[in-house]
Image (cartoon, helix red, strand yellow):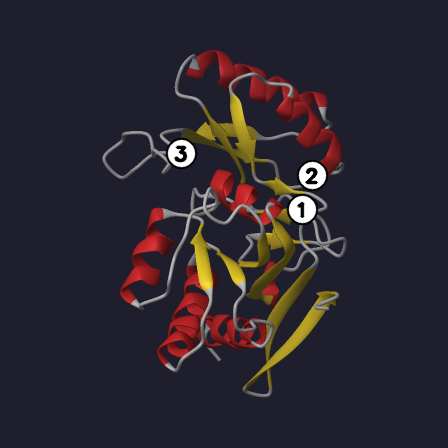
Amino acid sequence: MSGPDLRRAAAARALDLVEPGMRLGLGTGSTAAAFVALLGERVRAGLDIVGVPTSEATRAQAESLGIRLATLDEQPELDLTIDGADEVDDQLRLIKGGGAALLREKIVACASRRMVVIADAAKHVARLGAFPLPIEVNPFGLRATHRAVEAAVAGSGCSGDVRLRGLPDGKPLVTDGGHYILDARLGAIPDPEALGAALWAVPGVVEHGLFLGIADAAILAAARDGQAEVTVLGSLS
């Protein structure tokens, strides 16, 4: 069973949580895109919801499917956000931002009554950190911010290098908000809360990809005997 099949299985289970009239946060990334695609099918069949996208890519996909959209200024309180994750542990702590949308993803998730993660079960880890931690930073004073982030990482008991995320042409990747991304390749994060607090103390940091105390549940899909088996961490109710 392929990755797309597992992503679709997790997305289909999350779609069961959607009720008419809901205000939905729409995540970013391949698994979130699978959810938006299925949501579009339901909308074409008559489901009435409004979505708030977490990236311009998600906005474009949702618009192409006829999903009614709003901004957080228009809908500041959401019922549910469905989004993917790069890693999730047993405490529903996440690393997000592989798609460079972590700032908007966290704003939307925190404006929601519930956040449910959908993912391939391979994203479920015993300890966060194998996936590089994205840190969104202001371009102004980049070198100073980079050095301060490295110091914060080291002071939090982590080791590894911090690199500016670039494009194939060598230019820095620029987020939808006009910021840069530093990726901290740490291998393991022994204390995510301590690292998150240390990163917040760096003035040039706009947001970091540690989502702590935000997710209510995770829907994880794994291959079993050629079929997708879905399990849930946390509570979907």
Q: Which amino acid type is shown beneath numbered disc 2?
A: Ile
- Looking at the picture, how far across and down is residue 158, in whole percent? 68, 30
Q: CA distance from mark 2 to mark 3?
A: 20 Å
- Looking at the picture, how far across and down is residue 56, in whole percent? 34, 48
- Looking at the picture, how far across and down is residue 115, in whole percent? 63, 56
Q: Residue at x 36, y 38 (%)?
A: 176
Q: Which amino acid type is shown beneath numbered disc 1?
A: Leu
Q: Earlier in the sequence, mark 2 or mark 3?
A: 3
Q: Residues within 10 Å of mark 1 (few under 14, many from 20)?
A: many
Q: Which amino acid type is shown beneath numbered disc 3?
A: Arg
Secondary structure at numbered mark 2: loop
Q: What residue sits right under mark 3 in the picture?
A: 165
**Residue 110 appears left or right of 6:** right
Which residue is outermost to the left? 169
2 and 3 marks in contact (CB < 8 Å): no
**Residue 152 appears left or right of 73:** right
Q: Residue at x 56, y 46 (%)?
A: 131
Q: What residue sits right under mark 2 in the picture?
A: 189
Secondary structure at numbered mark 1: loop
Q: Residue at x 37, y 62 (%)?
A: 68
Q: What residue sits right under mark 1 in the picture?
A: 128
Closer-to-camera residue (158/68): 68
Q: CA distance from mark 2 to mark 1?
A: 6 Å
Q: How many marks?
A: 3
Closer-to-camera residue (14/73): 73
Q: Earlier in the sequence, mark 2 or mark 1?
A: 1
2 and 1 marks in contact (CB < 8 Å): yes
